[in-house]
């Protein structure tokens, strides 16, 4: 059995934000201690209002080397790019 604690990814929601932002990682034996350590390490200046701790092993991510096959299919869907719509003058700035 490994003596190393699992790795946790830390996300903080700032005072003036609506989304959580990844701020770093830390090792902790469980979610409760990961939360406490994240509070001590990443919110020392009272900058957060919410903390998420997620086990790194629970995150699935794409690889930068897969960029082409992963994101290129969206380029051929013109309806996702509303650049061909005429915007009426009375709408104003969008």
Image (tube, rainbow, N blue to C red):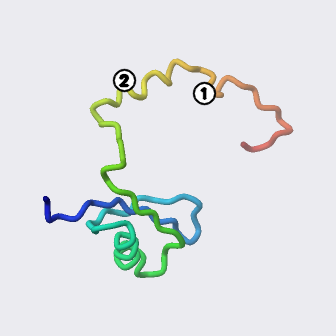
Residue 83 position within the rendered picture, expressed as x and y whole percent measured from the top left: 64, 27
Q: Work out whether mark 1 precedes mark 2 in sequence or the reverse, and give the earlier one.
A: 2
**Snapshot quadrant of residue 35:** bottom left
- Which residue is under mark 1? 81
> Residue at 36% of width from left, 47% of height from top?
59
- Examine the image and state in which quarter residue 10 appears: bottom left
* Residue 13 in picture, x, y percent from top left: 51, 65
Q: Nearer the viewer, mark 1 or mark 2?
A: 2
**Residue farthest along the right direction in this orientation:** 90
Q: How crowded is the residue under tag 2: few (<14 C-alpha within 10 Å), some, or many (20+)?
A: few
- Residue closest to the far top: 76
Classify mark 1: helix, strand or loop.
Answer: loop
Of residues 54 and 12, the one drawn nearer to the viewer in this rendering: 54
* Residue 92 as seen in the image, left or right of residue 47: right
Residue at image location 52% in from the left, 18% down from the top? 76
Q: At x 72% / y 25%, what residue is drawn?
A: 85
- Picture layout, residue 24 above or below residue 78: below
Q: CA distance from mark 1 to mark 2?
A: 19 Å
- The correct choice, above or below, for 78 with respect to 51 in the image is above
Instruction: Give the residue at mark 2.
Output: 69
Residue 33 image point, x, y percent: 35, 73
How many residues crowd around disc 1 within 10 Å: few (fewer than 14), some, or many (20 or more)?
few
Q: Quadrant of residue 60?
A: top left
Percent x, y of residue 43: 42, 76
Q: Is residue 65 left or right of residue 78?
A: left
Q: Is residue 23 above or below residue 80?
A: below
């Amino acid at each position: 059995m490994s003596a190393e604690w699992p790795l946790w990814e830390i996300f903080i929601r700032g005072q003036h934000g609506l989304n959580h932002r990844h701020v770093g990682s830390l090792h902790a034996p469980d979610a409760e201690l990961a939360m406490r350590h994240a509070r001590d390490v990443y919110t020392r200046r009272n900058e957060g209002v919410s903390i998420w701790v997620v086990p790194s092993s629970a995150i699935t991510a794409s690889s930068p080397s897969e960029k082409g096959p992963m994101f290129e299919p969206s380029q051929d869907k013109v309806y996702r790019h509303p650049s061909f719509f005429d915007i009426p003058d009375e709408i104003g700035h969008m």
